[in-house]
Amino acid sequence: MNDVHELLGRAADDAGTPALSTGTVYARAARIRRRRRALVSAAALTVVAAGALTVARAGEQGDTAHSSVATTPRPSGFPTSSAPALTKAERLAALLPPDVGKIEQVLLLALTKQIPPEQAKETYLGPLDGQYAFREDGGVGYLVLNYEDREAVTAKEGRPADPDADLCPEPGQETSRTECVREVLPDGRVLTLWNSAMPFRGGDDVRWGPELTGQLVQRDGSRFLVRSSTGFESTGTQGPLLDAPPVSREQLKALLTGPEVLPEKP
């Protein structure tokens, strides 16, 4: 209404000129209000733009005291720099199905020969080399992994491992190896898997149960050996034998031919 009063005052001052009608006065007042609202809106936009520019410049200057950075959360179980490194048993378990049972790293010499653990330790070359106990349904079986490079095989047998040698017995040959299968892989490595009843030998105070054995021979003369045993019987036994080897033939093949069990090439 102040706009109307102002126009009416101007009309009184202009006495003698053609009189303004009330409609004309209200129309002019409306135009004045629209112009003022437009000016106020433009000023507000200028203030908002200036504030946004100030915040942007503050971010560019690295104001870390009040800044925040959105990060993508890591999936559950994803290793972080602060998380402890996985043990060998945990890394091995990650390569096998969960139904193989609870896995624990052990020292078989300490168990079977009652040798102190500090004297039963062995030197390993492979990242997962070692001896592992598999506990399932009250029984205990074992998995032994051992990588030998060309020098180690030569020191033990007088020559490097020969990929052309056939470990499977000839027909009619008397041997404890059964269901022996030899396979030449596309890259030239040779994988051999066989079953062994592990017959009891007189004088041996440790009786091993049936097992599945695998050997991978590489073209450089190195080899990788794996035993998947149903367990053993002796004074140091940790439980009764398993009904079957803890790692099956298919699982053993996948383990032997995977890159996780072999040392990284220099």
Image (cartoon, helix red, strand yellow):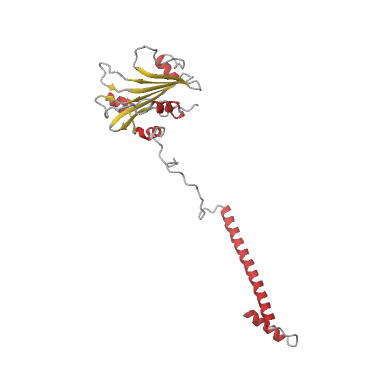
Residue 44 appears left or right of 196: right
Q: Is residue 91 visible?
A: yes
Quarter holding the N terminus is bottom right
The location of residue 38, given as percent across then percent down, is 65, 69
Residue closest to the far bottom: 16
Depth check: give the residue in front, 219 or 24. Answer: 24
Residue closest to the far top: 172
Residue 10 appears left or right of 94: right
The location of residue 138, given as percent across then percent down, is 28, 32
Depth check: give the residue in front, 42 or 61. Answer: 42
Up-down relation of residue 247 to residue 56 (above or below):
above
The location of residue 170, given as percent across then percent down, is 39, 12
Residue closest to the far left: 235
Residue closest to the far right: 17
Depth check: give the residue in front, 230 or 170. Answer: 170
Residue at image point 39% right, 25% down: 249
Up-down relation of residue 214 to residue 51 (above or below):
above
Depth check: give the residue in front, 100 or 263. Answer: 100
